[in-house]
Structure formats: C-alpha cells, structure tokens
Image (cartoon, rainbow, N blue to C red):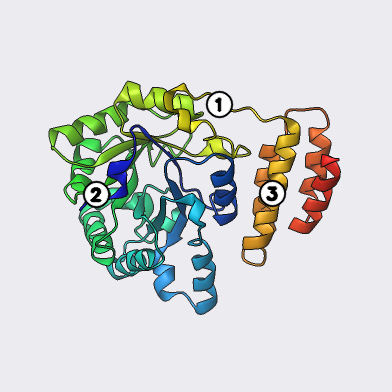
Amino acid sequence: MSFFWERLIKPVIVLAPMADVTDVAFRKLIAEFGKPDVMWTEFVSADGLLRAPEEGRRKLMKALEYSESERPVVAQFFSADLVAMENAARLAAALGFDGVDINMGCPDRSVERQGSGAAHIKNSSIAREIIRAAKRGAPNLPISVKTRIGYNKNELSTWLPELLSEDPAVVTIHARTRKEMSNVPARWQHVREAVEIRDNLKSRALIFGNGDVKDVPHAFELAKEYGADGAMLGRAIFGNPWLFKNLKDRERGIAYTPNPDERITALARHTEYFNEFLDGWKNFAIMKKHFKAYISGWDGAKNLRGELMETNSAKEALRILQIAKR
C-alpha cells in the first residue's frame, strides 16, 4: 500500500506535536505563514476518547480538529490499552487524518503511570501490540511512532528493532533518554545509529531526528550529516509561525526574520484563532506562553508584553494588540 510519506521529498521537515502549543488555532496560523511538510496534532489520550464522560470526550475531540490547509496532518495518540488505541486509530481514519502517530516518548508522570509515553520503552511487547492495534483500527493509514533513544540509557540496539519489527511508516527519534528529559543537548549521533539499525534490518521505515533543531537550514544540515530521512522541529516554533516560510526552497532556504509589526500582527491573528476555535474549551492562560515568545527584542516590547500578561481573555488581548499596531 502506498502512503503519503513515500511521495514526500527527503529530507522531510515536520512540526512536532506539543501539548497546549500545536493546537488547531496555532496550526492554522502556521499553515498560512509557512507550512512544514507534515503537521502533527497535540497528543490525545486514546483512553479518554473511549471512556471519558461526554464533556471530557468533547474537549479531547477539540484537539483533533484541523483545517484542510494543514494537510498532510497526523493525529497523535498515547495509550497502553489495545482497545482504546484501536478505537482512536479508527476515529482518526473516520475524521480524515492522513496518518496516526503513537507517542512512546513522553516523560510526563501522569502519562507514564498509565503505561504510556516513555513507559513503553520498558515494555516492548506491549508497545508492539499497541502498534498492531493502531493498524487494526486504521488499516488504510500509515502508523508511525515518536520515541526516545532509551529510558535511563541508550537502548536503541534493543528498543528500535522491536518497533521496526511491526513495520511502522516512520520512527521519530528524540535524541535523548527519558531520564534526560530536555536537560542535556540532543545527541544526534544516536539518530545515525538508528538509521544504521534500520538499514541492517532492511526495514522500510523512515527515520526522523528530533531535538535542538534551531530552524529549517539547521534541520537540513542535521539530516544530511546524520543520514536521517527527516527532521522534526518543536520549540523553535514558539513565537515564530514563519519557521517553515522558506521551506519550499529546500536547502537554499534561509531563516525568515519578521519585524516587530509583523510579530504583533501575527500574534493578533493567533489570538483571533484562539477566540474562534478554542474559547470556552481551553484556558486562555495557555496563550501567555505565546505572548512571551512573540513580543520581545525591540524597544517597548517589555511594556507591551506586560500589558498582555495581565489580560484574562482573547478579546482583552486583541484590544491591546490593535492599539499597538497603530
């Protein structure tokens, strides 16, 4: 079966899934300002989709909203429950997603207590069954995995072959262990190690690297140096929906630097989308991390940022931003 991954130009440059960051409002803005090759949703609890009360399930479904401009777009789930994962993958197919990704790297304690996220690294047999469950739920979609190099130490030599034995379309390697969180520099030599393991096993899976990717030119450099099929960018997107603006130029692209007016205008648009898609569903406080990222680096930015941090609604923030644009 031919999946969309096989039609993309390598190295593939993609946007990481980040909870309370890559929501439908921000992804819609990114798609307008500069689109990556592939987008991921925030990660969603497959267990919650199956068993949460109606109100909780409706909130989870908000994380699975997307705009057509985002395609190809991949839904990411976490679970250690086979029935829940199969159900979530089936739902993703019904909603028209282009792929399903399974989070096997999240270090959040509440996620790990469920046997999900990075906890999968300690139980490869369940991890393999979870991949199979996703394939049963969405047999016509590519199933991929995002993980880490190991739990307390590098375990790629044993962990990655277990994943590859289930023939995933893509394995994204966050080049740190779970123990390291993001507290040490990402070690991309382990991405090369993952590529070598894949090649030795004659697997068809694509290997993407993740961790400390500064911008698109840097992504190309890392992919070339370490032999990865693609690179995933995460934190670099904060305050920078232009991150992928020059991606169409591929290797010739240079990082785009917006001026203060562009930053204020982009934040206003982002805030409008939050108001349109997420008001009443997500706490407005999550926008404040974006205020800090957009509004910095010029005279007067500190005062404007201070005003925005005092707001309690999208409408309040928009009034301040509209005055700032004059």
Q: Position of residue 233 (x, y in %)?
A: 47, 37
Determine whether the residue tagged by mark 1 lies in a helix, strand or loop. loop
Coordinates of residue 259 in the picture (x, y in percent): 71, 29
Disc nearer the start of the sequence (3/2): 2
Q: What is the secondary structure assignment of the residue under circle 2?
A: loop
Query: What residue sits right under mark 1 in the picture?
Result: 255
Q: Dot 2 surroundings within 10 Å: few (below 14), some, or many (20 or more)?
A: many
Q: Amino acid type of disc 1?
A: Ala
Residues at discs 3 and 2 in contact (Cβ within 8 Å): no
Picture quadrant where residue 86 is located: bottom left
Q: Which residue is denoted by mark 3 in the rendering?
A: 269
Residue topped by disc 2: 168
Q: Residue type at mark 3?
A: Arg
Secondary structure under badge 3? Answer: helix
Q: Nearer the viewer, mark 3 or mark 2?
A: 3
Estimate the x, y position of residue 198 in percent, counting from the top left.
Answer: 19, 36
